[in-house]
Amino acid sequence: MRYFIFRNWIYLLVIFFTTLSVFIDLPKTFYQQDEWQTLGHNLAGPSGSALGDINLVRIFFGEGRPLSTVMYSLFLGYFKFTVFPSAIFAITFQALNSMLVFVLVSKITKNKLIALLSASFLIVNSVSHQAVTWVSANSTLPAATLILISLITYFNYLDKKERKYFYVSIISAILSLYFKGIGLFLFVLLPLLPFIYQNKSFTKKNLLFILKDNLMFLVFGFLMFAVRFISTFFRTEEVAGYASGGGSGSFIYAVFLRTILYPLTSLFQIFVPPLDLYSITPAITKMQYKFLVGSPLVDLVAQSIVADMIAIMGSILILFFSILMVHRSKDKIISRNVRFAIVFFFLSFLPYVALDRDSSYLSSRYFYVGLIPAGILFGYAVYFFTTFNKYIKWVTLFLVTVYLFHHAAIVRSDINHQVKLGNERVSVLNGIKTLYPNPSENTIFYVTSDKAYYGEVTNPFQNGLGYVLEAWYYDTGKIPKEFLSENFLWDLGDEGYKRSRNKGFGYYQDIDKMIKDMEKNNIKSEDVWAYFIKSKESEIVDITLETRERISTVSAIPK
């Protein structure tokens, strides 16, 4: 490895500085959504955090993502309200993963152009950038690092027949699951590599040999899969984002369908930013489904059925082109690597088959590992065109450069948008705390603004502002920890009041609802602290006195 780094240091520097240029503004962002819940649970202590739920059996089988729990206990516990450490962590691992992709692809293709293109595709890809730009998705990054290490060392094992590489590969694969279960497919992919790269046929003798060689790894993988399958399939309650469970046949059917549908649609989608695809679907929808014109369902159909149709056709073309490359080259190395990339890509979506989609695309972070094999196909496609005459070669390289810059520009734009939102959210929280630094043991916040941000919600937070304020003021000792651990006021638009151990807390944006709850709980108007968000200036105005006066005017509540 040291020799490889010495010979390829210029490529690794290019990868590092490209990563830095794309994500340089990430430390300027702020918490987006789920970070607040994790932070709140960490503030509430072990009984409220994921650490309090883990037992030895769950740790052994990687349930509860124990390494991710430790990671988030640091970033969303110790560091609390600063995103800087987690942003540096994300940028570092994004650069590291891109370098490991370069190492992996260099190893199997013996071609630096293909390796650099594959690494660049991972860096700038806008479809999967949430894994890097969203703190709550950052556990994907170290999991992917260990997946890449597992693949690289398994290839070393196949080349050198030294058992130490096999053990490093297996340990890395298993450790990745302690960050996130996205590497479960390795229990299938790794044992398949000898069949792809050593021309082994699927005879009984070879199958028994591979089974014996990987026995402990496969047994452990089966147990890990069984634990996850049982917890998902036999769960007693509905979980947001998951297909319906309860042991029903519909769940089995959904999982089977998604095993084929998710990778088949995602192979095209991973190359095409969602807004680019969704920009063409309305026109097709109007032509194909004329009866929906004017219907509120037209956008839903455009971003689901029509987008899926385009994606499937696009994926079929990609697969056809990949086969064409293999056929035209008649090169065994290319044939093996293309087969590896396709098998790898399809298997990489297995961990998500129990998840529902909100649109044609899966959530952004779920594409991240699929970038590795997709990057190999991308690199080979570019290399294929550069083998033609000089004119086609330079046109291809120009178009590829434009394409990669387009993806990078989308990532940069989204980060800049998050910086703007983050500044607005920080201004709101700092403004409120400056005006009201020490809450009482029975505080009610009334916060409104001149703008509706998300539907009817009049604040810039993507989850309940009441929960955010609980976390923001928790260190004052006036917020019961169970409010955080029980997710009181967590959901977007949540309003309400609650008491525990002689301490009360409430949050409202609807003054009529607040007055009703105050009358119900015998709360005085002096417990209300009201603020108005001036959206254009990101300024907080204290409207406490006039709000209390209004409460006393329309109700029997004393001041």
Image (cartoon, helix red, strand yellow):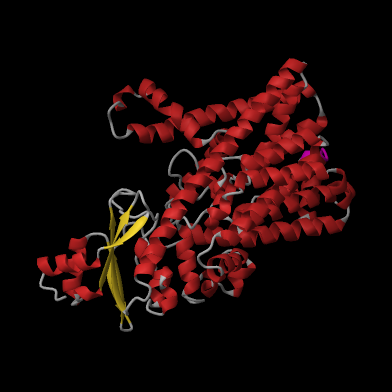
Which residue corresponds to the image point at 74% horizontal and 42% vertical from the top-left?
14
Q: Is residue 489 visible?
A: yes
Res 431 → quadrant: bottom left
Which residue corresponds to the image point at 36% horizontal and 23% vertical from the top-left?
286
The residue segment tinted magenta is 196-200
Instruction: Find out whether residue 82 is within the magenta segment.
Output: no
Which residue corresponds to the image point at 46% horizontal and 38% vertical from the top-left?
360
Instruction: Count up the numbered dots.
Output: 0
Residue 306, percent across and down?
43, 30
Left or right, 175 with respect to 433, comes to: right
Res 303 → quadrant: top left
Query: Looking at the magenta stretch, what is its main secondary structure?
Result: loop
Q: Is residue 239 visible?
A: no
Q: Is residue 225 above or below residue 477?
A: above
Which residue corresponds to the image point at 72% horizontal and 21% vertical from the top-left?
394
Q: Quadrant of the C terminus?
A: bottom left
Residue 230, percent across and down?
52, 60
- The one nearer the camera, 120 or 371, is 120
Q: Is residue 119 above or below residue 467?
A: above
- The one nearer the camera, 197 or 287, is 287
Instruction: Find out whether residue 198 is within the magenta segment.
Output: yes
